[in-house]
Image (cartoon, rainbow, N blue to C red):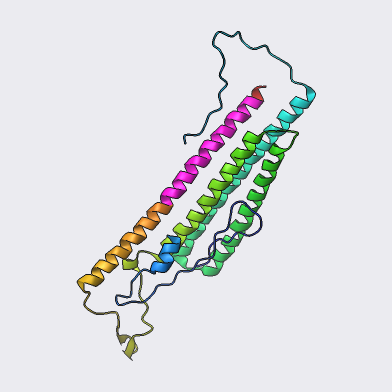
Amino acid sequence: MGLLQLRGKSRIGTVQRASSSPSSSRSGREIDSGSAGERMEDFEKKVSITDPMDSEPETTTPTPAAAASSSQVLHLLRRFLAVQQRRAEAYAKLKRGFAEYLVSGREVAYQQLCGEITAEFNDCSKQVIEMESLFMAPDHCRVDLAQMLRAVQAQEKQKLHLTATIQVLKKAGRPSERLVSHENCTFKKPMQHECVHLHEITEAEGTEEAEADAEYDNALNEAIRGVQDAVTTINEHLEEVRYEIAALEAQ
């Protein structure tokens, strides 16, 4: 199954194309251990510490240059939130498409969707990298915001990688529940054959299958938790952006 493969200098990173094909074994349902192995803060609020005995600070009128810079920062932060919204919509579209693919098995349609999502993620990443550079520029000197955008990029990269891992695992299915291939069976009549997969399962084979299922479950659960952690961290950073926007609008 083809998954996302990101190219270019995007910070989102690259998720290699992966394929899954059931491997035949004595029970016809063994997990590919090699493939399985490969697949397998509170956010800081900015506060201003002041002496409680100090009088209230005097209200100053910002200079035209400072006002222009604040306006540009505000614009960039709003633009960043818009990019994150695009990312969220792309993930929702990918999730729907993958669910449809599992039911229909339409490989070409899903490959086309992956291409569209890849292009969307690449564009979003390029825009965030551009904004990060602007925040670092002398006109703004907002290293804090640049670092925050970079942190979000890192979490988005992790989220995308783990999302692809989840899809690979779900497509493969639990080892004990995978369909077997009958291409090596002997057919005596059109609708009858001697199935090479039918045999008495030994205790050792049963243990091996249970271990494969446990390995699969652990890998899937770990990837799901990783996505949840990434989403939580990203949302914390977005909340910080909203605080910054509110502060700039209040000026």
Q: Which residue is drawn at 57% across and 15% down?
A: 50
Quadrant showing the C terminus = top right
Looking at the rendering, the stretch of residues picked out in magenta corresponds to: 224-248
Q: As drawn, which residue projects farthest toward the bottom?
A: 188
Q: Which of 91 and 28 is in front in this view?
A: 28
Vertical comparison of 129 with 170: above or below: above
Q: For residue 175: magenta?
A: no
Overall secondary structure of the magenta section: helix
Q: For residue 228: magenta?
A: yes
Q: Which residue is drawn at 49% across and 45% down?
A: 230
Q: Residue at x 48, y 54 (%)?
A: 162
Q: Which of 94 and 199 is in front in this view?
A: 199
Q: Which residue is drawn at 63% across and 41% down?
A: 82
Q: Quadrant of residue 220?
A: bottom left
Vertical comparison of 34 with 47: above or below: below
Q: As drawn, which residue projects farthest toward the right?
A: 64
In the visual, does 134 lie left or right of 158? right
Vertical comparison of 58 with 44: above or below: above
In percent of width and height, residue 116 lies at: 61, 59
- Tell me if I can see residue 92 in this picture: no
- Tell me if I can see residue 122 in this picture: yes
In percent of width and height, residue 202 lies at: 21, 74
Counting labels gives 0
In percent of width and height, residue 38 lies at: 45, 63
Vertical comparison of 227 with 74: above or below: below
